[in-house]
Amino acid sequence: MNSAEPSAAVRAERAVHLAHAGAHTLERPAPPGSKWPRWLRRGPLEMAACIVIALGIFMMLQPFALVLYTWSFVTTLAGVALFTIVSKFPV
């Protein structure tokens, strides 16, 4: 065995970590001394973007007010754009 190769236990531990990590390996957590305020992190703003998207879909499907239907596509598009931008923020 080459001395540069990790042992079987280390390789197994890495495999378990990768299996459990899944898509989370791409997340970039904010450093401990981050200057980002908590409300400006990914979690709260992704939730706000999802709410804006849901509001736009509700506006599109409601039968009561034409003005809500008129602005529904813009609202949904703004929510999708917000979600796309916010998904790049630190966790």
Image (spheres, rainbow, N blue to C red):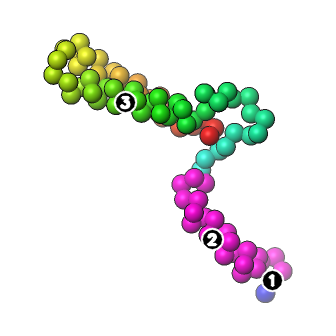
Secondary element at image label 3:
helix
**From the viewer's perspective, is residue 14 above or below residue 44?**
below
How far from the left and from the top, in percent, is residue 5? 77, 77
Earlier residue among tags 3 and 2:
2
Q: Quadrant of residue 58?
A: top left
- Which residue is denoted by mark 2 in the rendering? 15
What amino acid type is highlighted by mark number 1? Asn
Question: Which residue sits furthest right?
Answer: 3
Earlier residue among tags 1 and 2:
1
Secondary element at image label 2:
helix
As for residue 15 lying within the magenta part, the answer is yes
What amino acid type is highlighted by mark number 2? Ala
Image quarter (top left, top right, bottom left or bottom right) of the C terminus: top right
| Residue 48 in the figure: left or right of residue 36 | left
Residue at the spot 62% in from the left edge and 69% down from the top edge: 16
Image quarter (top left, top right, bottom left or bottom right) of the N terminus: bottom right
Q: Is residue 42 visible?
A: yes
Q: Which mark is residue 2?
A: 1
Question: Which residue sits furthest left?
Answer: 63
- Which residue is denoted by mark 3 in the rendering? 53
Per the rendered image, the range of residues in magenta is 2-25
How far from the left and from the top, in percent, is residue 87? 53, 37
Label 3 Cα crowd, 10 Å radius (few <14 / some 14-19 / many 20+)? many
Total numbered badges shown on the rendered structure: 3
What amino acid type is highlighted by mark number 3? Ile
Earlier residue among tags 3 and 1:
1
How many angstroms separate mark 1 from mark 2 (CA)?
20 Å
Main secondary structure along the magenta-highlighted residues: helix
Question: Which residue sits furthest bottom?
Answer: 1
How far from the left and from the top, in percent, is residue 76? 34, 27
Residue at the spot 32% in from the left edge and 26% down from the top edge: 56
| Residue 26 in the figure: left or right of residue 75 | right
